[in-house]
Image (cartoon, grey):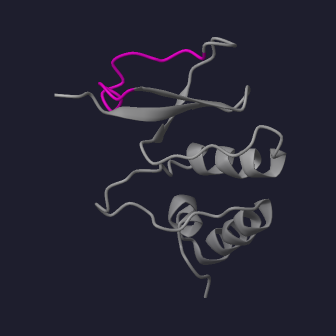
Amino acid sequence: MAHTKSSFVCLLCRASYKQQYGDVHAGARERPCPSCTRPLVHAGSAFAAPRRRDTAAWRTLSVLLHAGVRFHKCRCGGPHFRPRTPGEVRARMAHARRTGESFAASLVRRELP
């Protein structure tokens, strides 16, 4: 049986690495970045990294990953929409502050009321 690989991201190096999925949720072992040795962030199996020079996309990705939003292939209740620009992130942050909705839920909301 083949092992499933998932993407892990180094936000400092702006690099993505496919590694075996293993015990990601259990936190059994921290995965270091091959370049800077800082811990990698699990991004999910359906993650597609932006170009390294696209700083706005990497800033947006950083906000999403720190809020707990992941990129998975399955449709098991995972988010289907993710903001692509810093402007979309700012609008959703303002909505979360205004309404009291959680930041992560506001980030994956398709349309703002």
Residue reaching furthest to the left: 1
The residue lying toward the viewer, choosing from 35 and 31, is 35
Residue 34: quadrant of the picture? top right
Q: Residue at x 81, y 46 (%)?
A: 54
Quarter holding the C terminus?
Answer: bottom right
Residue occupying the point 58% across, 32% down: 9
Where residue 91 sits, quadrant-wise, is bottom right
Q: Is residue 14 left or right of residue 42?
A: right
* Residue with the most extreme front position: 2
In the depicted view, which residue is nearer to us: 27 or 100?
A: 27
Q: Position of residue 22 (x, y in %)?
A: 30, 25
On the picture, is 13 further left or further right than 96? right
Magenta region, mostly helix, strand or loop? loop
Q: Nearer the viewer, residue 101 or 92?
A: 92
* Coordinates of residue 43 in the picture (x, y in percent): 50, 40
Q: Specify whether 25 is left or right of 34.
A: left
Residues rendered magenta in the picture: 20-33
Q: Is residue 75 rendered magenta in the image?
A: no
Residue drawn 50% across and 48% down?
Answer: 68
Counting the numbered discs, the total is 0
Q: Tell me what residue is drawn at x 34 percent, y 29 percent.
A: 21
Residue 92 place in picture, x, y as percent: 67, 70
Quadrant, the N terminus: top left
Left or right, 68 with respect to 24, comes to right
